[in-house]
Amino acid sequence: MSELFDPIKPYVTHHLQVDEVHTLYIEECGNPSGLPVVFLHGGPGAGCGAYHRQYFDPEVYRIVLFDQRGCGKSSPHASLENNTTWDLVADIELIRQHLKIDQWVVFGGSWGSTLSLLYAQTHPTSVSGLILRGIFLARDKDVQWFYQEGTSKLFPDYWEKYIQPIPVAERGDMVSAFYRQLTDDNEVQMLRAAKAWSTWEGVTATLQANASVVESFSNSHSAISVARIECHYFMHQCWLEPDQIIKNVDKIRHIPGYIVHGRYDVICPVEQAWELAKAWPEAELSIIGDAGHSIVEPGITQALLRATENLSKKLKE
């Protein structure tokens, strides 16, 4: 199995107001009586795409997708107010309760893997299984690798474009320098910085450059939410204690888990998946030898489809 399922449309959509600021866009697809699964997108700030529905057998799964605070079809767009990791964790549980779901599979990649793990550690009885891709542990060293020094050594040509909006004197702390521009009142400057930040992620996401992936990151609407929200989270260490996810693995040890990671992931190096798997040996780790970070790479796609199939069978036993 390597091909996505056929495109489908939602059978119902919701606009759920979660506080005085934010309203979340939610959609349900597939089988209304099927095995519930929630898709947690990356970023933070990236939003869901229609193709994300296609990673699940629509006859087997009740597929729930939603755009996290400030992105996609949720509103207000790119808002940083009341937008923290723990707000998102609370939102996921609120959505589960709103949809009257007892337990669901949680499927997340990149930042979505971070959020999946934190949600499961906070609400373990709400989670029937975890399918994780492109593990991001959200530690300072993980952020520094991609935004300060690490990936820069592998892609010096793309790096040069990424750092262009930042004055030379401020390049010792790229996250802080970008944050100043991304939260500035100068909209022209903000958009320039947002496109540089988000395009850097798009061009390094796949083993071979993928034009559609780059476009999805670099269009103005997505770039603003991705750059502003990611930078906001990283400025606050994602509101996590050092190594918090690894230290709390015992809380999810009983949950069936699948970890899929590209061998040549330069955004979130495979070391992160390896460390998680060492701490959580009960989970099944698949390292994909010809893939980078993106969910659309063939080997990653195949492994995720296999995981959704295997987990659905395991949960029926």
Image (tube, rainbow, N blue to C red):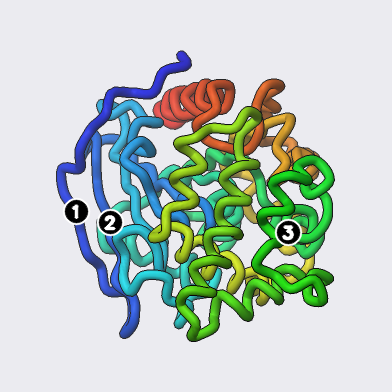
Mark 2 belongs to which amino acid? Ile
Where residue 230 sits, quadrant-wise, is bottom right
Q: Is residue 101 left or right of residue 165?
A: left
Hey, which residue is sitting farthest top in the picture?
1
Q: Position of residue 77 (x, y in %)?
A: 36, 70
Q: Is residue 205 left or right of residue 185?
A: right
Which secondary structure, mark 1? strand
> Which numbered tag is attached to residue 98?
none
- Label 3 to label 1, Cα distance in Å? 36 Å
Q: Position of residue 17 (x, y in %)?
A: 27, 74
> Which numbered tag is attached to residue 147?
3
Q: Position of residue 104 (x, y in %)?
A: 40, 46
Q: Are marks 2 and 1 in contact (CB under 8 Å)?
A: yes
Q: Sequence-wise, which precedes: disc 3 or disc 1?
A: 1
Q: Mark 1 highlights which residue?
A: 13
Which secondary structure, mark 2? strand
Q: Are marks 3 and 2 in contact (CB under 8 Å)?
A: no
Which secondary structure, mark 3? helix
| Residue depicted at 61% across the width and 69% down the height | 231
Using the image, determine if residue 221 lies above or below residue 298. below
Mark in the foreground, 3 or 2: 3
Q: Is residue 257 visible?
A: no
Mark 1 belongs to which amino acid? Thr
Q: Sequence-wise, which precedes: disc 3 or disc 2?
A: 2
- Label 2 to label 1, Cα distance in Å? 6 Å
Where residue 97 sits, quadrant-wise, is bottom left
Q: Is residue 45 left or right of residue 17?
A: right
Q: Mark 2 highlights which residue?
A: 26
Q: Is residue 155 visible?
A: yes
- Label 3 to label 2, Cα distance in Å? 31 Å
Is residue 62 or residue 273 the one in the foreground? 273
